[in-house]
């Protein structure tokens, strides 16, 4: 993967290249940033640059044998470790057992989350880890002679999923790796990574993307209309993984809009039959879709506040959404926005913890009848 193929992060790319050109490549680096900030593609493009025979001042050549092998994820000096759901039945104990599936997903779409990975494996709801056996495999791979006579590179994706035993087993190697060995750890959250691991790495903070970056990416990659791209980008809040999943399920976004309109009109009219009906409709969605619906609602509330109080700021809305907000936005104001946001965020929290969706959404719609009228 070339640096130019990675969305954004111009300054970070320059910093990574400067490490190589100044011969100051840190042997252990932690790419730390929010979900959907492109850390994995950035790490792979850096690995390709490190292994390239003819790198330029701005990118790897993309044509030498090493670049070709990295692109196909078959380079013998580029290794991956990632969380898996350990299963004796399926014969899965470490990431090596799912390397083929990993290569397929990365090749298809290198921007994905842990949930995306589990969904791809049909392992949703299960507990993925990097275990001590996975660490043993890392130690064995990095003890082998380099194929390229350059670097041996280990990318550990979602390093926060390493259990304590696995992390402790790697401590010595990360602190004093074999010559020309590079660790690239990737994490969304450093809080659950052993402090001793963090202290042995150079932290590279990877920020989330801007709305304009995500919108431009969606327009170019998926050939969608600019207004729709802005809506999806605003909804994603800089998470390109969420944006991609929304675009790929574009029909779902229309469903969210229709449900939201129905919910708000029922709440304003305080019609009990319609409220129960819409609550049941939302509860019948898949759990991830329920979470996306709540996020969509929070997005529309945010755009309502912008329309009411920041009229010169560009709204991230499609035409049908804008038409709706021209009538609806006035009901969302400083009298109720805090409480509405709290209730939606609380619902999201409970969905993640497997609350009964029918009870949850019934409670939410009843509360909305009071909160919507509070803004009148």
Image: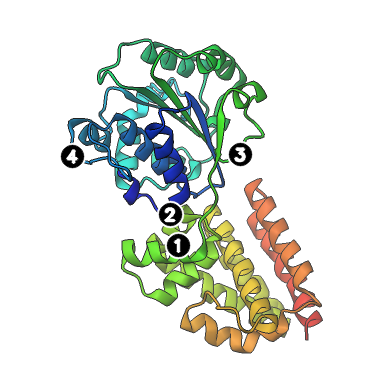
Extreme residue toward the front, this view = 22
Between discs 2 and 1, the one toward the N terminus: 2
Residue at the spot of label 3: 189
Horizontal side, residue 268 vs residue 236: left or right? right
Is residue 61 visible to the viewer in this orientation of the structure? yes
- Label 4 or label 1, whichever lies nearer to me, is 4
Which residue matches tag 2?
8
Image vertical order of residue 300 relative to residue 58, above or below: below
Q: Is residue 45 above or below residue 91?
A: below
Label 2 to label 1: alpha-carbon separation: 7 Å
Tell me which residue sits at (26%, 38%) in the image: 71
Distance, label 2 to label 4, CA atoms, is: 23 Å
The answer to the question of whether label 2 and label 4 lie on touching residues, with beta carbons closer than 8 A, is no
Badge 4: residue crowd in 10 Å (few <14, some 14–19, many ≥20): few
- Going from N to C along the chain, the mark reached first, 3 or 1, is 3
Residue placed under numbered mark 1 in the picture: 213
Mark 4 residue element: loop
Q: Secondary structure at mark 1?
A: helix
Which quadrant would the C terminus be assigned to in this image? Answer: bottom right
Q: Do callouts 2 and 3 mark residues in contact (Cβ within 8 Å)?
A: no
Q: Name the image quarter holding the N terminus.
A: top left
Pair 3/1: label in front: 1
Q: Earlier in the sequence, mark 2 or mark 4?
A: 2
Q: Which residue is mark 4?
A: 63
Are the residues tagged 2 and 1 within 8 Å (C-beta)? yes
């Amino acid at each position: 993967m070339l640096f130019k193929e990675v969305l954004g992060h111009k300054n970070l790319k320059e910093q990574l290249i400067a490490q190589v050109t100044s011969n100051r490549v840190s042997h252990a680096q932690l790419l730390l940033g929010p979900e959907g900030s492109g850390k994995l593609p950035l790490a792979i493009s850096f690995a390709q640059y490190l292994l390239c025979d003819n790198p330029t001042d701005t990118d790897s050549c993309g044509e030498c044998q090493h670049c070709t092998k990295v692109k196909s994820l078959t380079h013998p000096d580029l290794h991956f470790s990632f969380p898996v759901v350990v299963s004796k039945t399926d014969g899965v104990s470490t990431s090596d057992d799912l390397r083929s599936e990993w290569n397929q997903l990365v090749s298809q779409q290198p921007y994905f989350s842990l949930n995306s990975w589990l969904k791809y494996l049909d392992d949703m709801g299960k507990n993925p880890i990097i275990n001590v056996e996975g660490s043993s495999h890392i130690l064995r791979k990095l003890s082998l002679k380099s194929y390229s006579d350059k670097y041996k590179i280990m990318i550990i994706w979602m390093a926060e999923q390493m259990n304590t035993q696995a992390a402790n087993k790697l401590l010595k190697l990360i602190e004093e790796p074999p010559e020309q060995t590079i660790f690239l750890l990737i994490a969304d959250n450093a809080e659950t990574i052993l402090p001793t691991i963090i202290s042995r790495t150079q932290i590279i903070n990877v920020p989330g993307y801007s709305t304009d970056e995500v919108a431009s990416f969606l327009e170019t990659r998926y050939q969608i209309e600019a207004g729709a791209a802005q809506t999806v980008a605003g909804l994603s809040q800089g998470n390109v993984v969420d944006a991609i999943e929304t675009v790929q399920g574009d029909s779902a976004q229309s469903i969210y809009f229709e449900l939201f309109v129905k919910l708000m009109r029922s709440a304003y009219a305080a019609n009990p039959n319609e409220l129960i009906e819409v609550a049941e409709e939302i509860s019948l969605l898949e759990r991830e879709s329920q979470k996306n619906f709540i996020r969509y609602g929070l997005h529309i509330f945010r755009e309502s506040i912008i329309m009411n109080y920041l009229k010169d700021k560009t709204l991230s809305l499609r035409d049908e959404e804008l038409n709706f907000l021209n009538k609806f936005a006035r009901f969302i104001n400083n009298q109720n926005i805090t409480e509405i946001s709290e209730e939606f965020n609380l619902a999201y929290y409970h969905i993640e913890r497997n609350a009964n969706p029918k009870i949850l959404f019934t409670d939410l719609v009843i509360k909305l009848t009071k909160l919507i009228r509070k803004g009148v």
